[in-house]
Each structure stands twice: as C-alpha cells, then as structure tokens.
Image: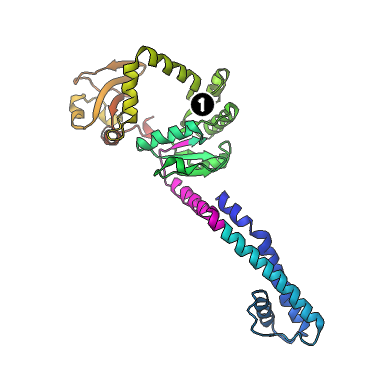
Amino acid sequence: MNLLRAVFRKFIPVFSILLLVIVIGTFGYWYLGHMHNTLFECFYMTMITITTVGYGEIVDVSHTPYGRMFTIIIALSGIGAFTFILTNFTAVIVSGELNNAFRQLQSLSRVKKMDKHYIICGSGEIGFQIAEELYLTKRQFVIIDKSEIEVSRYKDQEILFVPGDATDEHVLEAAGINRAAGLFAVTGDDNYNLVITFTARQMQDDLRIVAKCKEVKNLDKLKKAGADSVISPYMIGGLRMVSEMVRPTAVSFLDSMLREREKNFRVEEIILSKHVTGKSIDSLSLGNIEDALLLAVRHDEKWLYKPEGNYTVQPGDTFVFMMTPEARLMLEEKLGRLSSDEL
C-alpha cells in the first residue's frame, strides 16, 4: 500500500497543475468570449487546445491579441503537463514500480487470510535461510523489511512481503500478528531486534518469539523484552565447528537430511490435543503414517526416548518425530494441535 501511494504521489503535483490550467482556461475563455459561451464550451475549448487536437476555435478570440496569447500560454502549460504525465507513467511501467505496487497489494490481501503463519522481521542472510526452511516444510510466512526484498533470491517461491518498520504496530498488524504462530526478529541490529521483540510481545502475549543476537551481552535483554528464545549466530557457529571435529558422521547425516529435496525429512514436534489423552501409542496407529518415526515423548520437563507401544498419552504431552512435511500435516490433523481453549 505504501509503495502504491508513493507511485501515485509522484503525479499529484503535475495533476494539480493540469487541473489548475483547465480551470484557468475554462474561465479565461468564458471571460474572453464576453460570457456568451457556456462553461462547457469553454472547457471544451481548453481541452482541444492543451491536447493539440485543434478542431477550431469554439470561442472566438481572433478579435484580440490577448486572446491568442492566452491560448498560447494555455497550450504550452497543458502540453507540458500532459507530456510529463505520459513520460513518468511510461517510466513507472518500464521500471516495474507499478507492478511491484500491485504485487504488494495482492500480498497484503493474502496476508489477511493467513492464520498460524510466521512473521520474519528482516530479509538478510538469516531471514532468507528461515524463509527457505519454512517454505520447504510447507509453512506459511510473511517477511517484513524497510527496503524491498530481493525477490529473485527466492526462485519460484511465492513471497508475501510487507514493507515498513517492524517496530511499528500498524506494520505488524498488517502482517497479521494477531493470528500468527510465531515471529522471528532477525535484523542485523540487536537494538532493533530488542524493540521488535518488545513491541510484538506487548501486542500478543501468546506469540512465540525467536530473536537473533550478535552481542552475547544482549542475550538477557532480549529475553527480558519478551523473546522465548534468543539465538547467537556466533555461539551456534562455534558449536557447529566442534561437532564437525568430534562427530563428523552425525553432522553429515543431519546435513544430508536438511539438503534432501525428495523426502525432505525434519525432526518435528506435535503438541497433542485432549481427544487423544488416555489412549496408547499403539491405538493411535502411528505406523500407518508413512515417513514418520516417533523418536521421543516429552511430558512436563521429562523425556521418554523410544516410547513403547503401551505408553498412555497424558495431558500436555508432546511427540517428537522424524518425518516429512506431508507426514507432519497428516499427524497434525490426526493427533491435533492444542486449540486456544485448551491452553
């Protein structure tokens, strides 16, 4: 919407000038014609003058040099305004600004229909990686950034983009924060991520927020601002380097799993709904779901690895699977996420 306004804002001054020329021309000819002509005839005379149609003088100004001079001034002013409008409109079309503006309107319209989606604040390298992973695992998301994102990086993905400042409540509302499942604050500035986190938390109490932190000293600040989890790329990088050294085969396995495009396996979690409480794992027929392997069950703060088939589901259990996005969607429908009234 902001981009569309910016495009049309370029034409406001020249349209104002053109309108002024038309008004002056209409009343000028009305006066020069000694008010014998109707205002519509004077308007018509003005329009055929500034558009250089030249059908003849509807208002006879041949009897006075002032009339001819007035016509010259009106013609030059009107032609100049029309030329400016046409050239700039052509430039807007050629540069793609108009297309981008309409694409932005379409994005905002689609965002309004989204639910349980994710908001990515920042379209840098980390923002791109997050978007890539959400796309591969078939999750809806929208990107917020002050500048236009480099759409070509996303290949054939359909990117929903909301331009603006992610610390602005109106921008977050446009991104559907009241319906979102989570928000990533991953700009390159810790202070900016801090304000995004604080603003988002004030707007939505139950929103899960994951924030990026470059400086370790800011970790606690981001958590106090409302982040559920704070990630430091440097700490993650250090842990990854250690893993490459001491457990290279395990790292290679995880990398292969993440890069695989045909099966696209991921370790995912399913929060169980009340309707499966009290049932055993065997009775849930999880084995019928292709490409889904149950790894563990979490109850409160306790973990049960490789649970037996006779394990009984308890309230608040979370199942951890290795599975494909398609299997995740089937299991979410079968086992059910917690609804808001169950939380």
Question: 311 left or right of 59?
Answer: left
Residue at 51% in and 31% down: 185
Give the colour scheme shown: rainbow
**x then y, percent, for residue 271:** 33, 28
Residues 132 and 33: in front is: 132
- For disc 1, the marked residue is 212
Above or below 59: residue 326: above
Provide the secondary structure element on which disc 1 rests. strand
Quadrant for the C terminus in the image? top left
Tell me what residue is drawn at x 56 percent, y 53 percent.
4
- The answer to whether residue 69 is magenta is no
Asked if the magenta segment contains residue 107, the reply would be yes
Residue 41 on image: x %, y %: 67, 82
Snapshot quadrant of residue 153: top left
Q: Crowding near pointer 1: few (<14 within 10 Å), some, many (20+)? A: many
Tell me which amino acid carries mark 1. Answer: Lys
| Residue 232 visible in the displayed image | no
Q: Main secondary structure of the magenta part?
A: helix
Q: Is 310 placed left or right of 298 in the picture? A: left
* Left or right relative to 280: residue 242: right
Q: Which residues are magenta?
A: 92-119
Q: Quadrant of residue 288?
A: top left
For this rendering, which residue is in front, 290 or 83?
83
Vertical order, 332 against 101 (above or below): above
Give the x, y percent position of residue 308. Answer: 20, 18
Asked whether 192 or 197 is in front, the reply is 192
